[in-house]
Every structure is written in C-alpha cells, then in structure tokens.
Amino acid sequence: MERVRGKGLELLGKSRDELKAYCAELGESAYRADQIYHWLYAEREFSVERWSNLPAALREKLKLETTITLPSVRQRYVSSDGSVRYLFGLGGREDFTTEDTESTENKSQGSVLKKPAAVEAVFMPSEGRQTICISTQAGCAVDCQFCLTAQLGLIRNLTAGEMVAQVLMPLNEMEDKESGRQGGSEQKAPASESGRYIGEEEPSALAARTNVVLMGQGEPLLNFESVMGALRILLDAEGVGLSPKHVTLSTSGIVPGIERLGKEEVRPKLAISLNASCDEQRNALMPINKKYPLKVLMEACRNYPLRNWEHLTFEYVMLGGVNDAAEDARRVVRLLAPLTRVKVNLIPWNPGELPYKESNAETIEEFRRILVEKGVPAFVRYSRGRDVMAACGQLALKEVQGAALTVLG
C-alpha cells in the first residue's frame, strides 16, 4: 500500500478494494472500508472525526496514519453567466508512478517525485442541473494549435484523488450555498449513524443532477490508469453516484486509449475532438493526427462498442477561414458516413492570445445545415464562462486582463 512520504496513506482517490486492503493491514473488518468509502465519496465528508459510525479508536488511528489531501482553492473567478472557474493548487508529493496508454517502456517502479502544480476546473450551473468540467493533467502535451492550454506543455499527470476532488469540492460548495452554510463541512449539522446529515438533502440527490465532463486541461487517455481510477469512483452508485449517461470523456484521438476504453466495463460517454475535415488540415491544427491520422481514428471509432443508449460525439471547434467552409462540412459528412450513431457539436472558437478568429454566426449555421441535411445531427454549443477564461480552449492559468472581474476567495 503506497504512502505519501511524511504524511501517511492518502485516502482520497483510493478504491474500495484498496481501502479493504488497508483495513486488513490494521486488523479491521472489510465493512469498515465500506464505511470509509461511503464517507469519502457518497457523503463528501473529509473530517475523520465526523465519521460517526467508526469506533473512536479507529478514527484516532486514521488521523495519525492517513491523510486526505484536497487541492487548495487559489482563486474563484465568477462569470457573468454564473459559471465559476476554479484555480486549484496541487501540492508536490512522492508516492506514485506515471503511466500512459502508448507504452510501458518508461514506467518506473516505486516512489516518484511529483511537482507542485496548478489546474483549473469549471462549475457551470443551469436550471435543475449543474456541469463540472475537470482537468486530468496539469498542462497538456498534445499541442492543439488553437488551444491555450497547449502553451503550458505537460507539467504532470493528476492522481485519481486530484480528479475526484475537482468534482467533490464544487458539489460541497453548492450544498453549503443551498443550505445557507458558510465554511464547509465543519459547519454541518450533526451526522446520523447512517452518515447522513440531519435535515439535509442526501448527497446522492445532488450527484444525480450533476454532469461531469473530462474536458479541462490535459489529454485523459494519456493518463489512463488514474483517469479510470477516478471514473470508477465517480460512476459507482455507492461512491459519488454519477450516471455514465452524465459523464463524458473527450480525447484528441489517442487510438490505443480509445480501444482500451471500449473494453472497460465501467466507462463514461466518449467524445472525439475532431476540429478538421481532412488530414492536411488536422495535421496543422492537431499534430497528434500525424501519429493517428483520420483513417486510423475513424476505424477506431467504427469499432468502438456503443451501448444501446449511446451516441459517439464529435466536437468541432469553428475557426474562421480555417475549417469552416461549406466543403469542410461536406467532408465531415463523408468522414462520419461509415459510423452508426453519431452527433456533432459545433463549438465557436473562444478568443485567446492565438492567431485565430471566430467563425461568424451565418457560417456556423450554414455548416450545421449541411450536416443536418445529410443526416448528421449537429448542434451549436456556445461555451460558458468566456469572460473569465473558463471556456473551451481557454484554460491556461491566465489572469483576465481589462474588464472588471469578480473574484472570490
């Protein structure tokens, strides 16, 4: 069982099986691991002393031997549309190995030093639901030319716990706001023996109206093991309790990762960041296409095992004068023709310090019309939080210049 040097065992991000192994080391029954798992992920309670159905002696041992590390909230940037961009600080740590889906040649065993880092997540409220966009890496190595995150390069992979925390912390803040509390879990009413707080909405009810998209910083399929570890917790009915129908992973087209994801029993919906209608165009915009060209990517999509309720989503960032011509739309129709259940989200490019411009509304509508008339469902998706650099392609740890900005925390 891996420990964080100088801090004991990190609990956040641990699976039920890992917690059972730890409890076995302590000589505790397996059901104690179920209780710890419930407190961490279903109740979103991070103060061990409040885990009221655990014996006092076990709680004391956990306080001495384990840690629950939450990201620090460096800033909250509040958009005029209600979205909140979180700037999270992640501490350095020495306890785990890196890995990706492309090779095992460079994997090291044992303790690996992880740099301190900062990542961003975005909370987007809407009527009756909320969506949380989370990061899977600090920075990104894929180098999409129209995305500000690419300017950071890859700083490091995130752990499962660091990803899960990006969901749990905004949910707790929302719960506090709805109940009129300030200051988080320390101010909660006494917990019952079942673990629920008296007089409150069950945490599972809040999770049931939450969407999560893995579309923040990083390429999820290049941090496969940690991403899947987080997803198994998020999608577990006895964990965070999100529905697979409400969780989407977006990839730039890492074909080995797509193939590997399709074999997972527990998995989210899949979205492919397409953004071009031919190889020449995509090579220039997304250099990863030189490794996994469109023919190879489309074959992986054709073979991907969709569930009976599922569509494969293609995201297409509209870049004025680059990939938004009527002929581009017709090429996209031909590209997707061999696939069965697909839909396309057309995303107007969000301004940043890059040499691109937005497509105008008429061009976007004409592009959408061509797709729809040829039988490809297409929708225009305007990003939230553009004024606080929280929109698609804008997450690059930027301070917003110029207009007045609402900052909390």
Image (cartoon, rainbow, N blue to C red):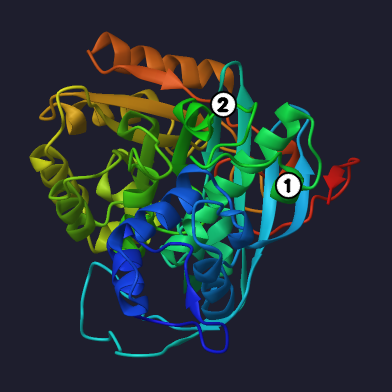
Q: Quadrant of residue 21?
A: bottom left
Badge 1 element: helix
Observer-side mark, 1 or 2, equals 1
Badges 1 and 2: C-beta atoms under 8 Å apart? Answer: no
**Residue at which label 1 appears:** 184
Q: Is residue 58 above or below residue 250?
A: below
Residue at (73% x, 29% y) in the render: 179
Instruction: Point out residue 409 in the picture as x, y percentages from the top left corner.
Output: 83, 52
Type of amino acid at the residue the image marks with label 1: Gly
Q: Residues within 10 Å of mark 1 (few under 14, many from 20)?
A: some
User: Which mark identifies residue 49?
Assistant: none
Residue 409 visible in this rendered orientation of the protein: yes
* Residue wearing tag 2: 382
Gap in angstroms between the C-alphas marked 1 and 2: 32 Å
Name the foreground residue: 334 vs 189.
189
| Coordinates of residue 231 in the picture (x, y in percent) | 35, 50
**Residue farthest to the top, as pictured:** 373
| Quadrant showing the N terminus | bottom left
- The answer to whether residue 233 is left or right of residue 403 is left
Q: Residue at x 26, y 57 (%)?
A: 254
Q: Is 395 rendered above or below residue 368?
A: below
Q: Is residue 395 visible?
A: no
Does 167 sit above or below residue 165? Answer: above
Along the line of sight, which residue is nearer the eye, 296 or 384? Answer: 384
- Residue plotted at (66% across, 34% down): 175
| Secondary structure beneath label 2 | loop
Few, some or many residues within 10 Å of mark 2 (<14, 14–19, 20+): some
Location of residue 266 by image quarter: top left
